[in-house]
Image (cartoon, rainbow, N blue to C red):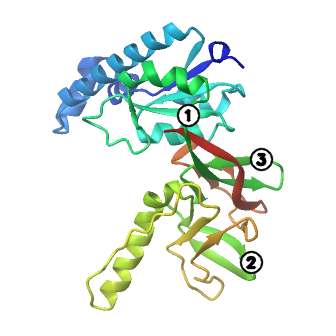
Amino acid sequence: MASLERKVVLVTRHTRLEELLVRFATLEQARFYVEHLGADFADYEREHRGYRAALAAVRERLELHGRYQVVDRALLPNFLFGPDDVVMALGQDGLVANTLKYLDGQPLIGVNPDPGRYDGVLLPFGVADIVKLLPEALADKRPCKTVTMAVARLQDGQQLHAVNDLFIGPRSHTSARYELQHGPRHAVQSSSGIIVSTGLGSTGWMRSVLAGAQAIAHGLEGAEPHIEERPMPWDTERLLFAVREPFPSRTTQVLPAWGYVTRDARLELTSLMAEGGVIFSDGIEADYLAFNAGMRAHIGVADRRGRLVS
């Protein structure tokens, strides 16, 4: 398809100030709430002005291209991307991950709306880069980094992809009960849930789980913890799972507490929770699979791949 015929989909998010206005209706009430807690409301306003200015500048550049559509992050679970779309996410890093899991090979451009505020590991471009970058991306002349995704599939056909990580466990702060099968290893467990991380997510939630476990183990031995960060490559063909706070009892086991998931060694889970069991990904709790008694989930490396423009 010619580059001029391709559509650009710009994914945006609400600022913290806009979220406060949804909750409190007026700027004055939002200001009172934030300042009453001792926070700096002016920072909320600066962030909002910066993001809206960046959004206006991006839209001005997209007008020159012609075919584009703006989609709010909240609509992603029900939005249908075209196979030839070029997708752009206007910061932060989390928005890039939230967008990528709904794509199936379409290139994704991460744009940092405020480099002074956001580190932007997944946001290599600024607003000013779009003039040169967009025509190259539309013509498939930009390199892309491949990102391996995880997928959870239920026996009824439902599935959910993850760019960073999957969470399998209770909706609230209660215990998750399930049967776990990983290769020859089998256990009935009661825990705070299971985290399954991709290579991209290995420096996120999974890092905190491993760091906490190491710190406790070293502390019990009377030694200072030595925490090593060992991130996996973004395109690695395996996932890492860890069981959070497994409880040992007469009927539940601690091991296996972690392991690698590959195409030949999937993780299979059967829910023993009467209600409140969920599977969600990348921190988006509103987009979830119900995981209640009798449901079986197969966790594995997804066939689809993410493509981040670099």
Q: Residue at coordinates 34% horizontally, 78% vertically from top-left? A: 215
Asked whether the viewer can see residue 25, the reply is no
Question: Toward the viewer: 205 or 108?
Answer: 108
Q: Secondary structure at mark 2?
A: loop
Q: Is residue 166 visible?
A: yes
Query: Residue 208 appears at what percent x and percent y?
Result: 40, 64
Image quadrant in which you'd find residue 48: top left
Mark 1 element type: strand
Q: Is residue 297 left or right of residue 228?
A: right
Q: Nearer the viewer, mark 3 or mark 1?
A: 1
**What amino acid is labelled 1 in the image?**
Leu
- Using a 10 Å C-alpha cutoff, classify the residue at mark 1 as few (fewer than 14 neighbours), some (14 to 19) or many (20 or more): many
Which one is nearer the viewer's eye here, 175 or 230? Answer: 230
Marks 1 and 2: which is nearer the front?
Answer: 1
Amino acid bearing label 3? Gln
Q: CA distance from mark 2 to mark 3?
A: 23 Å
Q: Where, quadrant-wise, is the N terminus in this rendering?
A: top right
Q: Is residue 153 above or below residue 230?
A: above
- Residue extending farthest to the bottom is 221
Q: Which residue is mark 2?
A: 183
Q: Amino acid at mark 2?
A: Gly
Which residue is label 3 attached to?
158
